[in-house]
Amino acid sequence: MKRIFILLLLPALLSSCLNQEGEGGTSTVQGYVYQVLHHDDVLNFDTDTFPAAKTDVYIIYGDEAVYSDKMETAHDGFFQFRYLTKGTYRIYAFNSYPDGRKEAVYDTVFVSRGGIVTTDDIYIHEGKMLDKSYIKGTLQARYYNKDIPVSDYVPAYGERVYIRKKGAPFHFEDVRAGLEGTFMFQKLDVGVYEVFALTEDSKEVVSPVIREVSVTEKGVVIEIEEPIKIRINT
């Protein structure tokens, strides 16, 4: 009876093995990997994104704990894993942080028997600014002449905007507003900041107009929604 029991189980075991994800089939998973470079300036996604040539891409069969296979992308970032069986696959590549850390960026796909599935484009990031965040906003000014307003609020081109850590007595950086009154502070770590510009009252006493901004994540751009408005006596 024992031998018969084992023989009866054998077809079920073979069927289970045949249904597992892996090599030996006629299916294909393919896609593209792009590299986003974070330089020491303002990120422009369009101009700072390139095909990730000769970059390792990994695939995991089913629910395996570690990668099952890997390959190197072509010059245009293209990859293709062929001869796969029907099932679910995870494909990933790595972000590279300035301190040497790696972080997987992945997509999960299901492929039918004999099918070809294209993953979502995979964007991997690297560069010394990858961990840093940005604060941007707009500065507007209303100009006065002897207590009489000579303009409505307009972009405060060329006027200074300052930033300091919350509670700090002094600012650590200042920038001038651009043509549209826009400004940006870069290379920021997680923390709470005070962004401010100086305004004058009718007696030309100067005081700061402050916006408190919390940076809670790395690698994000936070925009101050309302313009900072100041008065300038001419």
Image (spheres, rainbow, N blue to C red):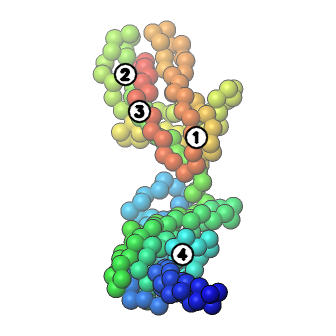
Q: Which residue: 48% across, 17% down?
A: 200
For disc 2, the marked residue is: 142
Q: Amino acid at mark 2?
A: Arg
| Residue at screen point 61% across, 34% down | 192
Q: Which residue is mark 1?
A: 216
Q: Nearer the viewer, residue 226 or 199?
A: 226
Secondary structure beneath dot 3 equals loop
Q: Please report the residue visible at 67 percent of the width from the left and 26 percent of the height from the top.
A: 167
Q: Residue furthest front?
A: 1
Q: Position of residue 134 (x, y in %)?
A: 52, 45
Q: Which comes sooner in the sequence, label 4 or label 2?
A: 4
Amino acid carrying mark 3 in the image: Glu
Query: Any mark on residue 225, and which?
Result: 3
- Does dot 4 land on a helix, a strand or a loop? strand
**C-alpha separation, residue under disc 4 versus residue under disc 2:** 60 Å
Q: Nearer the viewer, mark 3 or mark 1?
A: 1
Q: Specify the label residue 60 is tagged with.
A: 4
Mark 1 surroundings: few (<14), some (14-19) or many (≥20) residues within 10 A: few
Marks 2 and 1 sit apart, C-alpha to C-alpha, by 33 Å
In this view, the mark in front (4 or 2):
4
Q: Name which quarter of the figure residue 67 lies in.
A: bottom right
User: Given the image, on which type of amino acid does mark 1 rest?
Assistant: Thr
